[in-house]
Amino acid sequence: MIRRLSQARERGIPEATVARLPLYLRALNGMAERGLATVSSEDLAVAAGVNSAKLRKDLSHLGSYGTRGVGYDVEYLIYQISRELGLTQDWAVAIVGVGNLGRALANYGGFVSRGFRVAALLDADPEVVGDHIAGLNVEHIDELEAVIKRRGVSIVVLATPAAAAQQVADRVIAAGVTSILNFAPVVLAVPEGVDIRKVDLSIELQILAFHEQRKTDRMTGGPAMAEEWPEAVDL
Amino acid sequence: MIRRLSQARERGIPEATVARLPLYLRALNGMAERGLATVSSEDLAVAAGVNSAKLRKDLSHLGSYGTRGVGYDVEYLIYQISRELGLTQDWAVAIVGVGNLGRALANYGGFVSRGFRVAALLDADPEVVGDHIAGLNVEHIDELEAVIKRRGVSIVVLATPAAAAQQVADRVIAAGVTSILNFAPVVLAVPEGVDIRKVDLSIELQILAFHEQRKTDRMTGGPAMAEEWPEAVDL
DNA sequence: GTCCCTTTGTGAACCGGTGCACAAAGTGGG
DNA sequence: CCCACTTTGTGCACCGGTTCACAAAGGGAC
Ligand SMILES: NC(=O)c1ccc[n+]([C@@H]2O[C@H](COP(=O)([O-])OP(=O)(O)OC[C@H]3O[C@@H](n4cnc5c(N)ncnc54)[C@H](O)[C@@H]3O)[C@@H](O)[C@H]2O)c1
Ligand SMILES: NC(=O)c1ccc[n+]([C@@H]2O[C@H](COP(=O)([O-])OP(=O)(O)OC[C@H]3O[C@@H](n4cnc5c(N)ncnc54)[C@H](O)[C@@H]3O)[C@@H](O)[C@H]2O)c1
């Protein structure tokens, strides 16, 4: 086989594709557990909840790892996707803010499974510092920089109140971290080169509410006939 | 002022716009608290972390609610966005699966604030049923249909283990619910007309890991020169 | 080796969303 | 009343992503 630098591999995988690779990986792991050796794009697409043309195009960005007439080798594809996503190494994650949510995350086994390891818990509350959660000691936020360095933390999960999030983010970034998963409902300002992803429960619910309203409006014959807002706010 | 049926309002707001409205709303609420009466698209855009042309186009989909040369009236815009999102009514939410995550969500004050009310907690574990959390009694999953009907639940938050999620979703949908926020790491199969949104921590971390890997690769001079996978899996 | 069947990989049309750039609209000052 | 200034609302070009549809590639039967 010629070692052609597959046209796709060399530079940049589309962001939308990256976001779906974990889905494929999960589906593939399920299949591997069930002992499946190969899978067609059609079957994998169904398992991942996407259409098969999209799946094939996504995979084509990683290289040409299928066999025409047969499909994809499950184990091999798992390896290739894992490698692409950087899951062949393990990542030390620190959780900052050990309240309701931080505790739930710390106790969650699900993401330790693949490449991620909770390496530190940090909080500002002296009441919480020193607690033992999921086999880890909660450390004081003053130790942030030291802990990040000492444990080789490269991803930080922010689960502090909104008011503290920006300030903590600044420190974390100053300490060299460039990947943050933010649960606090604020827009974080960060310098170029830092990746932020946010999870926002309240936004998700509001989006659902929007569609729910549309659905019930449709039942009852539209929203009280076009524009009918109370004159309360008279601008 | 003429009551022209603003060209935009009547049908469909782009999905991308809907997803940003909650962001604008949050920024506006902050401004209202600080006593600001009007705001320009530029300032609001900065607060929401988007560009101002996008903001204006988004708002134009709701109608023409600004004043040229001045900006937008903060209170009025809050009202219009809230109404569009369906936050002027309140929504009864049920949380199914009261484990680590379900408890954190139940105790979370942040989304009760705007239109959403946790109306029920349900679990299958007899050990958990009967617990009193955040002023609510945990009810048995057998009561699911009755509880949904009795409390007028229209949005369900799924926080069960992955294995139970599809089964619970089926029951919830059969009971008439068409809006689900799913935390379990599975692709749910649902009929047409049912809206699912998912929150998947593990996917977010994997996306971060992908970019983190790229960043460190760039430092160290690319990934071991193009294609160099162990021949372990020899396909 | 030849033929038929399956399934991949991708060119190309299409679609939704983004951002520029500007005309239109409104404000305030003189 | 007019002019200078501000800021909205949007036409338009562009871009990333999706989907269709099919040629090319491989497998297996004979
Ligand atoms: N609980 C949920 O279900 C949920 C859902 C969505 C979003 N959120 C958001 O997640 C964040 C955490 O929520 P929670 O319910 O766990 O809140 P919480 O109040 O229970 O926990 C916050 C923790 O952060 C700590 N903290 C405060 N300031 C800090 C600082 N400067 N440095 C380090 N730690 C600090 C506090 O001591 C506390 O332990 C909030 O921003 C919240 O809006 C929570
Ligand atoms: N904890 C986290 O931080 C976290 C993060 C991301 C995703 N998740 C996902 O969220 C879900 C819940 O996580 P968790 O950590 O709270 O798990 P958990 O095991 O602590 O809680 C699950 C709860 O669901 C209940 N349950 C099981 N089957 C049920 C059924 N058929 N009907 C009703 N209730 C049922 C269990 O009794 C238990 O109380 C899981 O799917 C997990 O993968 C959790």
Image (cartoon, coloured by chain):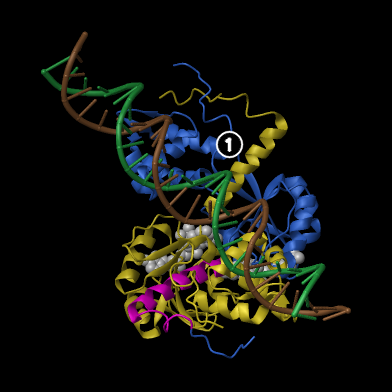
Chain colours: A yellow, B blue, C green, D brown
Majority secondary structure of magenta residues: helix
Between residues B117 and A194, which one lies in front from this camera angle? A194
Chain containing the residue with disc 1:
B
Q: Please tell me whether residue C9 is drawn above or below residue A83 in the rendered image.
A: above
The answer to whether residue B218 is magenta is: yes
Q: Quadrant of the C terminus of chain A?
A: top left
Left or right of B42 in this view: B160: right
Disc tally is 1
Judged from the image, the secondary structure of the residue bearing numbered disc 1 is: loop
Q: Which residues are magenta?
A: B201-227
The residue at 45%/43% (across/down) is B25
Q: In the rendered structure, which amino acid carries the disc numbered 1? A: Gly
Residue B73 % position (x, y)? 38, 32
Residue D8 % position (x, y)? 37, 31
Q: Is residue A23 visible?
A: yes
Between residues A7 and A213, which one lies in front from this camera angle? A7
Q: Is residue B140 visible?
A: no
The residue at 77%/57% (across/down) is B170
Between residues B85 and A29, which one lies in front from this camera angle? A29
Q: Quadrant of the N terminus of chain A?
A: bottom right
Quarter of the rendering containing residue B133:
bottom right
Quarter of the rendering containing residue A47:
bottom right
- The residue labelled by disc 1 is B12
The residue at 53%/80% (across/down) is A115
The residue at 73%/70% (across/down) is B163
Q: Please tell me whether residue B69 is drawn above or below residue B173 in the rendered image.
A: above
Residue B224 % position (x, y)? 42, 84
The answer to whether residue A23 is magenta is: no
